[in-house]
Image: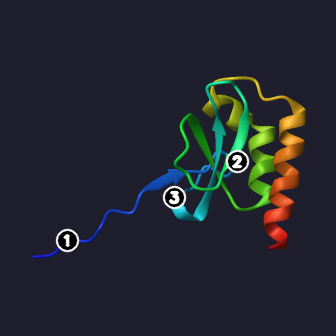
Amino acid sequence: MKTRNKIPMRQCTGCREMKSKKEMIRVLKTAENDIILDATGKKNGRGAYLCFSEECLEKAMKNHGLERSLKMAVPDEVYQSLKKEFESIGKQ
């Protein structure tokens, strides 16, 4: 009897919906307290997940979801760079 593989689910910090890990992008806090986007989802560090929409990024900024998940204050420059990266992803 063959069982189905488990699909890893994660919660978006913006819209708070549970989705599969492949449908989301990971925002990562490294050991040096840098905040980057992790496209592979396998880099070391504390991660938070966002949907591939700018609306979810806006909601995460408004409700401080990223700050709560990453357990640190996120500067505005990081939000601006994340916004630019989301725009470049949307154009592809």
Picture layout, residue 65 above or below residue 84:
above
Q: Tell me the amino acid under the disc marked 1.
A: Thr
Q: Nearer the viewer, residue 10 or 42?
A: 42
Q: Quadrant of residue 73?
A: top right
Residue that carries the numbered disc 1 in the rendered image: 3
Q: Nearer the viewer, mark 2 or mark 3?
A: 2
The mark closer to the camera, 1 or 2, is 2
Q: CA distance from mark 2 to mark 3?
A: 14 Å
Residue 37 marker:
2
What is the x, y in percent for residue 83?
A: 86, 51
Q: Please say whether residue 69 is visible from this viewpoint.
A: yes
Distance CA(mark 1)–CA(mark 3): 20 Å
What residue lies at 56% left-to-right and 34% top-to-bottom? 45
**Mark number displayed over residue 21:** 3
Q: Residues within 10 Å of mark 3 (few under 14, many from 20)?
A: some
Name the spot of residue 46 as percent of width and height, x first. Answer: 56, 34
Q: Secondary structure at mark 3?
A: helix
Quarter of the image that includes the C terminus: bottom right
Question: Do the residues bearing badges 1 and 3 touch, measured as CB atoms within 8 Å?
Answer: no
* Residue 20 appears in the picture as rendered: no
* 85 sits to left or right of 19: right
Give the image quarter of residue 51.
Answer: bottom right
In contact (CB < 8 Å): disc 2 and disc 3? no
92 on left or right of 42: right
